[in-house]
């Protein structure tokens, strides 16, 4: 324990004292090696854990990547030569885990497990990592990035939906008592200026969106709308909740016979049909939702079977696009559970929804511990969302239901 506290103290001092960008600019390979070891070194307590829990493994994945700057895939508008910079200088908080949105939900994963007391033996290390990144100076850099010209569409809607999930998580923790609640309130206060800009951009965008975005990847609107609503329920933002609810009902209330036979596409990580169903449970009463689901997905069995929806297959886990299908299995799992949660207890479809959710979730989790960074840098967040039943609680339900 003494050793672990000393290690955590060293991490706080090191992480807070210099940015990853400054470290990466160092000329010597020795300095570069220190950077990599600091952010990817194994937990000193790992050898004592037999077996290591899934939550511990997922937390370790996130801790290993939130400050790992390279490899990196950025989606970046250059307004001038001054915008040519390494990721950690462009977005000083969310630059790791290969891309901005994965860095965001990597931070969410850590906040979720920490706030839920699911990895108490890692609490100090997680708090140190989050404290080092959630500084006023680094968040100001993120805010400046979003406020620059031609950045209103940056990470819209997927990345900004995950950002709101992060601040929603911190709100949940902040509403509690004790040291964690106090710490979460501090981090949330620092993140709120960025949150305000992002929410303002969403409110500006939604009235202009004429059609739903039915892709199975980042631009899908249904998944983002669900997370927007969950954030609005926690923040009390009735304006955003109203805008999203109006769009969700306008886009999808008349949807019929969603073509599940066309899924999945070869690079999907979100189901076009199931994410709509998971969204609509948030904006309908239980009775109305049950009727709507009968016409939207009329072939859901009522016999408790789990083989009515085949899991996605990944033939090459090193391929960053093909590995999306592992994420699809996990996101299908949480959508199916969400759908079941909104149906009346007597609805005969619930058993088959839950059976298929278990099949997909277990399949997806088998891929999370892959040694291939193309999948491991983000799949742990999807697994944590499913394992912890995020989105299936009183704060995410339709207030009219």
Image (tube, grey):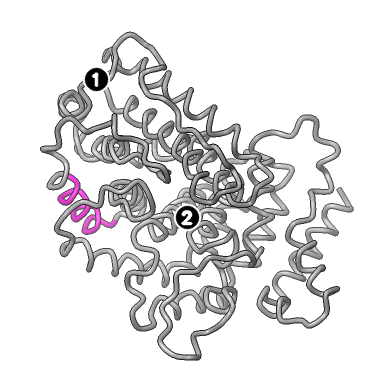
Q: Is 357 colored magenta in this rendering?
A: no
* Main SS category, magenta section: helix
Residue 208: percent from the left, percent from the top? 16, 64
Q: Nearer the viewer, mark 2 or mark 1?
A: 1
Q: Secondary structure at mark 1?
A: loop
Give the residues in magenta. Answer: 237-248
Residue 315: percent from the left, percent from the top? 55, 37
Q: Is residue 31 above or below residue 70?
A: below
- Quadrant in which the C terminus is drawn: top left
Residue 166: give its label: 2
Query: Quick one: label 1, few (<14), some, or many (20+) residues within 10 Å?
Result: some
For the point 83% across and 44% down, which residue is it? Answer: 45
Please, which residue is most extreme toward the front here? 315
Q: Is residue 224 left or right of residue 173?
A: left
Q: Secondary structure at mark 2?
A: helix
For the point 17% across and 30% down, which residue is it? Answer: 257
């Amino acid at each position: 324990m003494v050793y672990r506290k000393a290690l955590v103290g060293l991490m706080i001092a090191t992480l807070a004292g210099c940015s990853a960008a400054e470290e990466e600019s160092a000329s010597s390979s020795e300095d570069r090696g220190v950077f990599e070891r600091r952010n990817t070194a194994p937990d000193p307590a790992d050898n004592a854990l037999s077996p290591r829990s899934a939550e511990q493994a997922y937390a370790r994945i996130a801790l290993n990547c939130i400050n790992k700057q390279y490899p990196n895939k950025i989606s970046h508008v250059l307004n001038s030569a001054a915008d040519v910079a390494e990721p950690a200088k462009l977005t000083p908080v969310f630059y790791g885990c290969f891309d901005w949105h994965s860095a965001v939900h990597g931070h969410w994963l850590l906040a979720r497990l920490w706030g839920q007391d699911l990895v108490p033996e890692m609490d100090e290390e997680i708090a140190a990592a989050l404290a080092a990144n959630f500084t006023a100076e680094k968040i100001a850099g993120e805010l400046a990035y979003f406020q620059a010209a031609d950045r209103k569409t940056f990470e819209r809607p997927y990345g900004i939906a995950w950002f709101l999930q992060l601040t929603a998580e911190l709100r949940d923790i902040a509403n509690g008592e004790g040291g964690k609640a106090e710490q979460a309130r501090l981090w949330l206060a620092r993140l709120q200026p960025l949150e305000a800009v992002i929410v303002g951009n969403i409110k500006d965008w939604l009235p202009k969106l004429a059609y739903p975005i039915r892709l199975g990847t980042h631009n899908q609107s249904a998944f983002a709308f669900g997370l927007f609503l969950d954030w609005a329920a926690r923040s009390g933002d009735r304006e955003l909740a109203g805008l999203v609810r109006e769009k969700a009902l306008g886009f999808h209330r008349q949807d019929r016979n969603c073509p599940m036979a066309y899924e999945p596409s070869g690079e999907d990580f979100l189901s076009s049909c199931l994410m709509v169903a998971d969204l609509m449970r948030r904006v309908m009463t239980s009775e109305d939702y049950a009727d709507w689901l009968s016409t939207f997905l009329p072939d859901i069995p009522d016999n408790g079977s789990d083989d009515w929806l085949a899991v996605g297959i990944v033939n090459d886990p090193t391929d960053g696009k093909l590995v999306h299908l592992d994420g699809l299995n996990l996101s299908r799992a949480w959508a199916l559970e969400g759908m079941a949660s909104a149906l009346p207890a007597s609805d005969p479809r619930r058993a088959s929804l839950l059976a298929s959710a278990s099949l997909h979730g277990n399949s997806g989790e088998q891929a999370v511990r892959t040694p291939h960074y193309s999948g491991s840098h983000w799949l742990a967040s999807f697994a944590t969302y499913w394992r912890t039943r995020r989105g299936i609680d009183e704060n995410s339900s339709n207030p009219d239901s």
